[in-house]
Amino acid sequence: MDAKVVDEVPNWFKASFMDFSEDLEEAANNNKHVMTYFHQNSCPYCSKLVEDNFHNASLVAKLQKDFDVIETNM
């Protein structure tokens, strides 16, 4: 049985032009940190992380409160 592979990241991730100095400044101005999520299309481990953690209500609430999450597709 093959694992389900999810290549989409949650819609609450921050849209970024990958100018990290700008992202850091914006996060600091909003009293937040920056978290960079590195992933790869068709990666079953990445899919598992997205499905199990980035859809967990309490974790998502904490991340949205304290972090600007930026995704980087390798």
Image (spheres, rainbow, N blue to C red):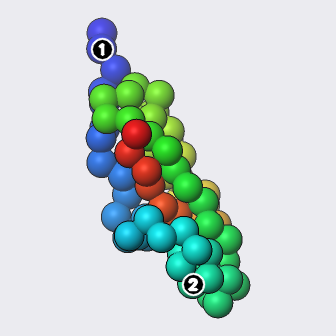
Residue 26: assigned label: 2
Structural crowding at the residue carrying mark 2, measured as other residues with C-alpha within 10 Å and reported as few (<14), some (14–19) or many (≥20): some
The residue identified by callout 1 is 2
Residue at point 38%, 28% (across, down): 43
Relative to 53, say whether 16 is above or below: below
| Residue 67 visible | no
Q: Quadrant of residue 48?
A: top left
Q: Position of residue 2 (x, y in %)?
A: 30, 14
Instruction: Report which quarter residue 61 is drawn in.
Output: bottom right
Q: Residues within 10 Å of mark 1 (few under 14, many from 20)?
A: few
Q: Secondary structure at mark 1?
A: loop
Which corner quadrant holds the C terminus? top left
Q: Is residue 22 left or right of residue 11?
A: right
Is residue 40 visible to us here? yes
Q: Amino acid at mark 2?
A: Glu
Q: Position of residue 23 (x, y in %)?
A: 54, 75
In the displayed structure image, the side of residue 6 where residue 36 appears, left or right: right
Find residue 19 and report its horizontal and vertical position in percent. 48, 70
Residue 17 lies, with reference to residue 44, above or below; the image says below
Badge 1 amino acid: Asp
